[in-house]
Image: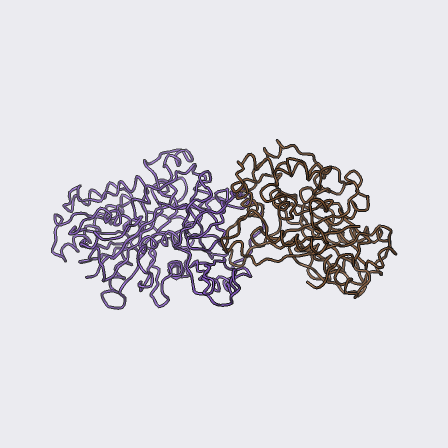
Amino acid sequence: MAGSIKDRVAIIGMGCTRFGELWDKGPTDLVVDSVEEAYTDAGIEAKDIEALWGGSIFTAHGGRFFTEALRMQYIPATHVVNACASGQDAIRNAAYAVAAGIYDIVLAIGVEKIKDEGMSGLPGMDNRTHTHAVATMPGVFAIMATKYFHRYGLTPEEGKTMLAKISVKSHANGSLNPKAHLRNVLTIERVLNAPIIAWPLGLFDCCGVSDGGAAAILTSAERAKEFRKDPVYIKALQICGTPSSGRITTDYDYTHVEESYRAGAAAYREAGVTDPLKEISMAEVHDCFSITEAVTMEDLQFSPRGKVKDDIDAGTFELNGELPVQPDGGLKCFGHPIGASGIRMVYELYLQLQGRADKRQIKDPKLGLAHNLGHEPYAPLCSVCIVGL
Amino acid sequence: MIGITSYGAYIPWHRMDRQLFLKAWGGFAMPGERAVAYYDEDSVTMAVEAAIDCLRDIDSHTVDGLLFATTTSPYKEKLCSATMALALALRRDIQTADITSSLRSGTTAMNFALDAISSGRANSMLVTASDMRLSPPSGMTEQALGDAAGALLLGKDNVIVEVQGSHSISDELAATWRGETDTFIRSWEDRMTMDESYSKVMPEAMEGVMKKCGLSPKDFAKVVFDPPGDVRRHGRVAGELGFEPAQLLDPGGLFMSVGLLGSAMSFTMLVAALEQAKPGDKILFASYGNGADAFVLQVTDAIEKFGERRGFHKHLESKKMMRSCNDYLRWRDIVPLDQARRPERGHISVAANWRERYVDLGLWGVKCRRCGTPQYDYGGMTTTPIRVCAVCQAVDDFEDYNFARKKATVFSFTHDMLAPSLDPPTSVAMIDFEGGGRSLFDLTDRDPDQVQLGMEVEMTFRKVFADRGLNNYFWKARPIRC
């Protein structure tokens, strides 16, 4: 790879709506509310934006959705559709355009209005012939938990307790966050006794289902300090696509996600990180399900393979631990309005780096990592973004 | 010599103790159990199962025709045997036909197949008979019926049962019927139909074929013929014809264990008889429904070398007792049910179905010629057809590879409570095929508590989706049945 994004682009303003069942908010509200906060934060106006990239799976249909909501005056606009990484990919495309020297100030948005469906869960994504196993998303990640427990010799009780600690930790963090959807504090007993959604995953092993929007304003590293004294610099932006061979060939172990590992390794190279556990100050990872977070800790090299349980038990990923994970509450407490999630993660890292995370503030963070995992574990698309001061 | 060259049968895994009907509706419970097709089964899928059993050690490309006999075709217009031919990997230059509307459609189809063979137009004809009949809930007939399928392969080579003669009678009487808009069968008073039709027509057909062949009742080792709604009348007809009770394949046993199987009754009884038959046995075989067909059969020496089948008895012994009548009502879509709060699944695309017909109905994948990796990817996604090897990226360098009859093992699984199902949870497994290849499949005919990693499974053809009168069929995995 010839180039690197490291320290070439800065984030100078961000916004994020409260996530939740926002019955009275339409798609436009989510865009305008998050972007207005970002304008104010950056100290700019709509007319300063030269181009925009908007991530969304279900809500937007083309770049017009964003320019229309914001009444943008004839600027280039691109709709980014890239599964659960849509928001991060909007940032990536926007950052590359700035790094290429084409634009000075650009906008990346992520938005999803999920709760207009009349049900819990995501809208349908059936194949044309309706001929496939009918597992839900909890189902295909539950299959990973089954395999992980088996491979590493965990009884269902030990495995479920390990996963319960993840959800308890995320809810503890989410309870401190006024923008989180779910702010209740959980106990391990409550998690273990919750109804099964897809064995072995129970209700509290699954993230919420929410509406939300988030936005970031980017400029070049050279100009960043014209806008604020504490811009946050992009250190790495990596996306790893998939050959979707994990459900085709028998060599996939279903206890790791190769695409997460590769996106992480590439991001560490780009950012110059050699010891992730030591150098990364905090991480927002794609905890669509508790098992996803557990496996991601190994894929991102925070924990040795098969050993994440030791780190979970040691409290490594808690807010006051060695490497706080999901300091804002994660997908677990924010839910997963698909297009918005990636930018919502970066929003938390941005606030933490600037010392603006209030009760959740981590002491003196230097580097933050955001990770998304789209589709299923055997055929995913993964993104990793590293930001820092 | 023309006759039966192979046989197979299928009885669904699920059985219902008739006491459950009494618990649900009150009144009276007939003794015994009935076979109940699962929510993802119908007459087509059961016929495919029986045909797979029948073709177990036979090259499907030697079959020159497929007849599907039923009174419960899922379609008023559209050929089911064409669907089945793909599931069974039969050739394209064959005759396919559905023979419907009569409870003796199985033997009618058998006669047509024999004619095709004796005329030289075909060497080998596969005849399936399958029924999943619906009677109005809470009635006695609902208790009496059962779901099953049978299959006979007819031909000239390796004949295990020679067909030495046949005789047919046509008889006009609306004993049972379903009109254009009827969901459930209707019937006239059975005392009248037994007196005036069954008790006259069956002897007429059986005496007719015995006369043609110059045989009398004492010449037969077994006599196998359909019972009427009241099984006791079967024995009376046999006695009046001059048969001893020992010669009878007693339908009472079938009634007690699986029920009255509609057009599958005659084939299922015959398969049960053939499983016990010895070379030289003569069998008088007959079926009833708006008339009767009767056959004189002679078991040959070849039956001693006949390969193993699941047939009637093994399927009979492999069973799962149902919990309640509610499950039966739910599986049959007889009562309106609360809909799961899940996304609507959209319409079937006939074009996509057609394009993916070999992938979906035949479970055809590919094997890479360069790296040798077998690969399957279910149809309808952007990922089919497989054009590029998932391992070595070779392009269009594959041979066809069939997964339908491969065994597999459960690599990992879940029991999904959220996925909509007529019998939750939805059990889903990533399975690894013997010889290579992996895919995600629904698990059916499984006890959730028994599913384990490493469990051996086999593929079974099931109905997976219905939309605007069209059924989509596909394959699921199930623990090795028996």
Number of residue marks: 0
Whole-percent x and y of residue B291? Answer: 25, 54
Q: Nearer the viewer, residue A290 or A323?
A: A323
Q: In this rendering, is residue B457 above or below A91?
A: above
**Residue located at (72% from left, 44% from top):** A282
What chain is colored brown? A
Q: Nearer the viewer, residue B320 or A373?
A: A373
**Residue located at (49% from left, 49% from top):** B430
Q: Is residue A178 left or right of residue A239?
A: right
Whole-percent x and y of residue B313? Answer: 29, 44
Whole-percent x and y of residue B318? Answer: 35, 42
Q: Is residue A77 left or right of residue B375?
A: right
User: In the rendering, what colour is chain B?
Assistant: purple
The colour scheme used here is by chain
Q: Is residue A208 left or right of residue B168?
A: right
Q: Nearer the viewer, residue A194 or B432?
A: B432
Whole-percent x and y of residue B159? Answer: 22, 58
Residue placed furthest toward the right = A226
Quadrant of the snapshot with the C terminus of chain B: top left
Quadrant of the snapshot with the N terminus of chain B: bottom left
Q: Nearer the viewer, residue B221 or B201?
A: B221
Residue placed furthest toward the front = A274
Q: Is residue B18 left or right of residue A322?
A: left
